[in-house]
Image (spheres, helix red, strand yellow):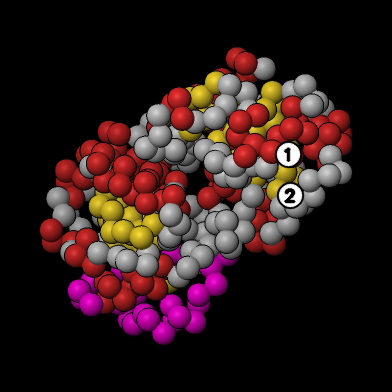
Amino acid sequence: MIAVCIEASHKRGMGHIFRALNFTKYLAEKKEPFVILINEDPASLKILSEHNLPYEVIHFQDTDSNWEAELIKKYQVDIWLNDKFESSAALCRHVKQQGILLAAIDDVGEGAGFVDLHFAGMLFGKKESEIPGKHVFCGFEYNILNPEIEKYQRKRSEAKNVIVCLGGSDTYGATVLAVNILKNYGYAADIVVGPNFRHEKELADAIDSRYRVFHTVPSLVEKFSHYDIAITGGGVTCIEANAAGLPCIIIASEIHEITTGKYMERLGGAVFAGYYKELREEAFRLENLDISRMSERGKKAVSLKGSENIYRKLREYQ
């Protein structure tokens, strides 16, 4: 039994829950039992219920009761995988006290030093020796991506159709910033907002007839397949877009996304427009982008075998 421990909210974002959906889909195909452990976030719990996935609501602020041990016993967990960005030392210590394998994905918390396996697919700019954990695995081959991407991969050649997608929550309203820049340049676009988006009024005030808004689309990968360039955040979405051959203009909503944006730009499938507080508007000049080259380089750089590679390592070291 694998416990997948995640955190999602308007502030934390929704990337962790979407990644959990992709990984647990792979586990289900392997007939591997699992349970998702998640904080109490209504939008996230609705998603899990709609997918009929097993989950337990937990309270990460409780560092004393050792709820971790109770859940390990209840579900007979033998592998615990943290995907919550900042795991606490208390959580990881409690898990390790139960004598099971502890793993983490892109974790920068104090608890990362306790993990047996650390899958650092997105800790760009760090050497392997700088990443905590007993065994560290770096690179795109350890990024969990939507398996549907392979079905929709194609090369783009011109920036005719633009889509804006700044994550499941877009904590700071970067969607509105992007729309205002696009308006200044006279570009039309479609916009996707997620289940924890809370800037509806500001967005409604910003858009005109050139902009269509879609709420929580069934498949973002399928939606992306109709476009030539995407304006995204610096999380998993820009990586999935590039994997499908869709070039990106990346806006960093969090400080740690700056590194991601710059790294993706170096790979050639994206342009980094900057931190949301200090955007470079010239990065949105679509006529200056070599879409064909960006599409090819982005698709070539990204691996689609992350779930398989992580699962194999989990069972290898278990």
Name the residue type under label 2. Answer: Phe
Quarter where residue 149 is shown? top left
* Residue linked to disc 2: 60
Q: Is residue 304 shown above or below 161?
A: above
Q: Is residue 189 shown above or below 293?
A: below
The tag on residue 91 is 1
Residue 230 showing in the rendered view: no
Residue 190 falls within the magenta-colored stretch: yes
Q: Quadrant of the N terminus?
A: top right
x then y, percent, for residue 23: 57, 36
- Residue drawn at (45%, 80%), measured in percent from left and top? 202
Q: Quadrant of the C terminus?
A: top right
- Residue drawn at (58%, 21%), measured in percent from left and top? 134
Label 1 neighbour load within 10 Å: few <14, some 14-19, many 20+: many
Q: Which structural element holds mark 1?
A: helix
Do the residues under discs 2 and 1 have CB atoms within 8 angstroms? Answer: yes
Q: Earlier in the sequence, mark 2 or mark 1?
A: 2
- Residue drawn at (51%, 65%), measured in percent from left and top? 171
Residue at the extreme top: 316
